[in-house]
Amino acid sequence: MAVAKKRPSVGSKRPVPPRRSPTPRGVGRKKTLKAKAKAVTDPDQDRLSYIRGLIRDVPDFPSPGIVFKDITPLLADARGFHMTIDSFAEQLIELDFDTIVGIESRGFIFGAPLALRLNKRFVPIRKPGKLPWKSDRVSYELEYGSGELEIHRDAVRKGSRVVIIDDLLATGGTAGAAAELVGRRGGLVVSFAFVIELGFLGGARKLGSTRPISLLQYD
Ligand code: AMP
């Protein structure tokens, strides 16, 4: 016969949290504060390592020589996806902005939940021919060939403070083109946010003086 596990009865011994020794004012206090600061940053590193562990390298996709950073394992891991949105939110919460612009298509995946979390407007930038309303178009150079992006003309208000988000920063062409579209509508790009930055391609240099927020750097 199966026996149900015994549940601890009320009044049974519970784990007692370790007693905190009182911090004396003066000499030892600075050390304690330093230790506390370290304790706060370490979980961040753990979180970023966890996210990094969910990015899959796919060699030679979509063409020979390219190592594609596949984020689908990250999206399929609820904890990792939460951690990613949390990490972005913590870095963006101090910024003064009103709109998140997501770049099709993987920028939508991170941009929309973040806009909800931070109570900001969400605006999609799409590949040509997808937007139904009056749109502005920009062409830009890619590593091989060229690309085009569009935005609705009424999507960004004049004077709007915008954060542009995508999954990955490579050469910076895509994010730079998105910034061009926002600028043409009278918006001000206050920051860029990426899950992954391929630092060795130098894309950040194309984004002006704003240092992008990149959760994971690959050098
Ligand atoms: P770029 O315009 O060169 O900065 O390229 C960035 C855009 O291309 C982003 O929308 C990425 O999703 C995609 N991309 C470029 N390189 C990669 C890569 N190695 N792995 C995954 N996506 C990439």
Image (cartoon, rainbow, N blue to C red):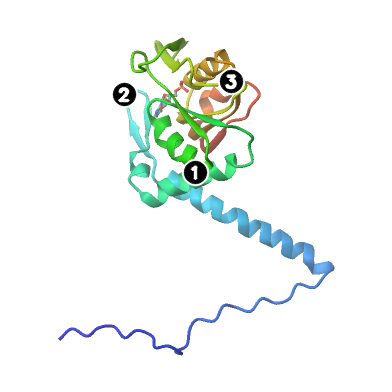
Q: Position of residue 173 (x, y in %)?
A: 49, 18
Ligand number 1: quarter of image? top left
| Tag shown at residue 187 | 3
SS of the residue at dot 2?
loop
Between the C-alphas of marks 3 and 1, the distance is: 22 Å
Between the C-alphas of marks 2 and 3, the distance is: 34 Å
- Closer mark to the observer between disc 2 and disc 3: 3
Classify mark 1 as within 8 Å of ligand 1 or not, answering yes or no.
Answer: no
| Tag shown at residue 62 | 2
Q: Residue at x 75, y 72 (%)?
A: 23
SS of the residue at dot 1?
helix
Q: Is residue 20 in view?
A: yes
Q: Earlier in the sequence, mark 3 or mark 1?
A: 1
Q: Residue at x 34, y 84 (%)?
A: 7
Q: Earlier in the sequence, mark 2 or mark 1?
A: 2
Amino acid at the residue labelled 2: Pro
Front residue of 145 and 191? 191
Q: Position of residue 183 (x, y in %)?
A: 57, 16
Q: Position of residue 78 (x, y in %)?
A: 37, 50
